[in-house]
Image (cartoon, rainbow, N blue to C red):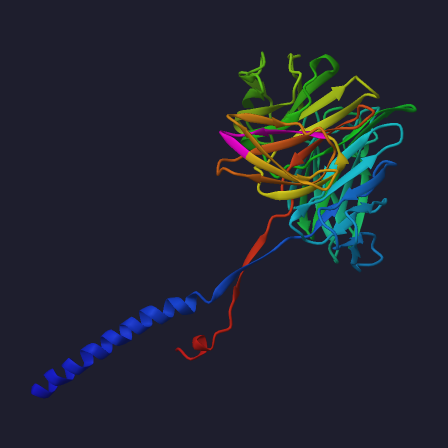
């Protein structure tokens, strides 16, 4: 009996020490993983519809290649500007955003943020009417064939889907008039069934020999009940604006619009409770409002909805631009290629910093704040700019780009290079010695 008591007396500390060792070492073994992140590659559109193109890169020494089906060899770019061609461009992963600028002779500049692509891309914009020269570009940057489906919508109904195969490391350009023939109101849903496909839509219009303007339509990932469109041109005397809606579900939507400007917020007449029919493209003109400064729009709906804004200006050579729904900004760097711009932000008690280098090589910094919206209008052309949100509340931003001939372009402010994360194990001999 005394032996049993003595044995228990000895085993107690041993078991306690073993429990402490297990509690100490096992979490340490589990912690032998580290987070690893990388930036995905992006794709820039080719020069579409007879345009000339240059691509503004956010850094030097980036690996790039032409997506042409002939080679997949990457070449390092030594400058911030890359001359485009009729073929799309593949850009290696980096922490910035690339912007493609396309100029159509006799027309104006159209700007597009280069995209990563995804399984679903919605385009709410463009025209397939008699003046349409619009082009849909489907880019397969992978090394195997890809299959996609195009689900078109017009002003009357959802149309039959179109299945397309795109060869490896190549692109395919399709006239919008051949997808939705004859209709001025167009929406497209691009679904990738296999492969890595990135899509671009250039809305280009021409009447005879007269150019009517051009604009890229930014893609949207999904329909939502609340969305924001920021950075719309506000000279009412020379502009006409139209809202375009698509409810992809099976129920009509009740929509409420709120306009944000430097003068406050208000709802246009007729947009406090607007019913939008489902599964058809609906265009509704915005009433002429005396907004001489850039503004933004909040869209609220009781059903998931897609919304975009179309602006046509009559001053200068005449041009138009499409603005799409935005995603919240995160810290990112973008190269604006020496273009003048105005930047409009929407958010609650928003605060954003802009950092750039001026024409004399001096580092500049600007704090942009506002209760519900804010406007930043730098007077000089900009190159590399870094935007950093300072609050945890979502902030949405858009840029208005104007050239010397009066041409207009809208550019969404977003980080198209989000980090792809993964857990990578760390080799540790202690994990091999424990059963």
| Residue 109 found in image quarter | top right
Above or below, 381 against 193 in this view is: above
| Residue 413 found in image quarter | top right
Magenta stretch: residue 345 in it?
A: yes
Magenta stretch: residue 331 in it?
A: no
| x, y percent for residue 340 | 74, 31
Count every numbered label the image shows and give the total.
Answer: 0
Q: Residue furthest bottom?
A: 3
Q: Residue furthest left?
A: 1
| x, y percent for residue 133 | 84, 30
Instruction: Out of 253 and 200, give the one closest to the viewer.
Output: 200
Instruction: Out of 154 and 333, give the one closest to the viewer.
Output: 333
| x, y percent for residue 415 | 63, 43
Residue at screen point 75% across, 20% down: 312
Residue at screen point 78% across, 33% down: 110
Instruction: Out of 207 and 378, give the one closest to the viewer.
Output: 378
Residue at screen point 59% across, 24% down: 297
| x, y percent for residue 26 | 37, 69
Majority SS type along the magenta span: strand
Quadrant assignment for the N terminus = bottom left
Q: Which residues are magenta?
A: 341-351
The reply to whether residue 322 is in sight is yes
The reply to whether residue 156 is in sight is no
Residue at screen point 61% across, 32% down: 397
Q: Is residue 5 left or right of residue 44?
A: left
């Amino acid at each position: 009996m005394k032996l049993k008591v003595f044995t228990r007396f000895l085993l107690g500390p041993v078991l306690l020490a073993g429990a402490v060792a297990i509690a100490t070492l096992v979490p340490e073994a589990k912690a032998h993983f580290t987070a690893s992140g990388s930036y995905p590659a992006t794709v820039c559109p080719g020069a579409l519809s007879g345009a000339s193109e240059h691509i503004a890169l956010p850094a030097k020494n980036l690996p790039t290649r032409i997506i042409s089906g002939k080679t997949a060899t990457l070449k390092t770019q030594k400058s911030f500007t890359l001359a485009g061609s009729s073929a799309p461009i593949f850009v290696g992963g980096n922490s910035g955003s690339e912007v493609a600028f396309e100029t159509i002779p006799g027309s104006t500049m159209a700007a597009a943020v280069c995209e990563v692509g995804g399984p679903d891309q919605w385009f709410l914009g463009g025209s397939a009417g008699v003046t349409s020269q619009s082009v849909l570009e489907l880019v397969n940057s992978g090394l195997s064939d890809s299959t996609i489906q195009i689900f078109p919508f017009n002003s009357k109904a959802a149309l039959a889907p179109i299945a397309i195969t795109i060869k490896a490391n190549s692109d395919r350009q399709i006239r919008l008039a051949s997808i939705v023939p004859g209709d001025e109101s167009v929406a497209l849903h691009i679904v990738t069934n296999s492969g890595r496909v990135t899509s671009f839509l250039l809305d280009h219009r021409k009447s005879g020999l007269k150019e009517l303007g051009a604009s890229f339509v930014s893609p949207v990932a999904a329909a939502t009940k609340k969305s924001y469109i920021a950075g719309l041109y506000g000279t009412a005397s020379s502009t006409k604006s139209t809202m375009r809606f698509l409810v992809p579900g099976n129920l009509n939507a009740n929509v409420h619009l709120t306009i944000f400007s430097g003068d406050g917020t208000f709802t246009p007449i007729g947009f406090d409770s607007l019913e939008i029919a489902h599964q058809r493209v609906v265009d509704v003109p915005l009433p002429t409002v005396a907004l001489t400064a850039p503004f933004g729009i909040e869209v609220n709906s009781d059903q998931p909805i897609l919304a975009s804004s179309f602006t046509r200006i009559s001053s200068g050579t005449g041009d138009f631009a499409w603005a799409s729904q935005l995603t919240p900004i995160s810290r990112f760097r973008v190269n604006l290629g020496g273009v003048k711009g105005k930047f409009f932000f929407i958010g609650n008690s928003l605060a954003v910093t802009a950092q750039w280098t001026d024409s004399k090589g001096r580092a500049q910094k600007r704090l942009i704040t506002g209760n519900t919206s804010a406007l930043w209008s730098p007077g000089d052309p900009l190159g590399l700019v870094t935007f950093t949100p300072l609050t945890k509340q979502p902030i949405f931003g858009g840029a208005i780009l104007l050239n010397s001939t009066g041409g207009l372009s809208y550019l969404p402010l977003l980080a198209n290079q989000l980090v792809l994360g993964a857990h990578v194990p760390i080799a540790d001999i202690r994990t091999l010695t424990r059963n």
